Amino acid sequence: MSMRSIAYATAACLFVVSLATKSDQLIRGRELHDNGCVGCHGSDMYLGEQRGHNPYYTVRLEVKRWSEYIGLEWDDAAIDAVTAYLETTYYRCGEARC
């Protein structure tokens, strides 16, 4: 097997792993959101005028602020997971950090 083939195979494996990791993060984010956030508000709050106009850091800041306020004790990974879920599902800024 040539070095080029090994490099391509390695890149393909890393890509698949990153997709699986992102998928796991989104699943966890949805579960945390549904268990920690929906009790106080529904998803309709994400569908207003500002939909698609919330920068990633603003969404993350709100997730962190409210999780602390209601005592969810989420760590950074949980906050990142919920933020990724909201970004992907409602705001669609994703990795672009709009």
Image (spheres, grey):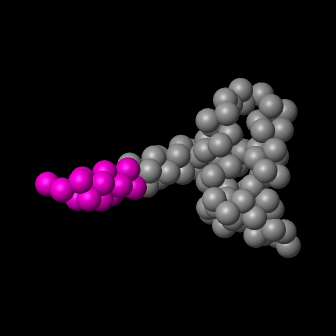
User: From the viewer's perspective, is 95 left or right of 50?
Assistant: left
Residue found at x 80% / y 31%? 68
In this view, the residue in front, 73 or 95, is: 95
The main secondary structure of the magenta stretch is helix
The reply to whether the magenta stretch includes residue 24 is no
Residue 84 location, x and y as percent? 63, 52
The reply to whether the magenta stretch includes residue 11 is yes
In this view, the residue in front, 13 or 72, is: 13
- Specify the quadrant of the image occupied by residue 80: top right
- Specify the quadrant of the image occupied by residue 81: top right
Outermost residue, bottom direction?
A: 49
Part of the protein shown in magenta: 1-15
User: From the viewer's perspective, is 7 left or right of 45?
Assistant: left
| Residue 44 showing in the rendered view | no
Residue found at x 61% / y 54%? 85
Residue 20 location, x and y as percent? 41, 50
Residue found at x 67% / y 63%? 96
Residue 41 location, x and y as percent? 77, 52
In this view, the residue in front, 54 or 31, is: 54
In this view, the residue in front, 91 or 40, is: 91
| Residue 37 showing in the rendered view | yes
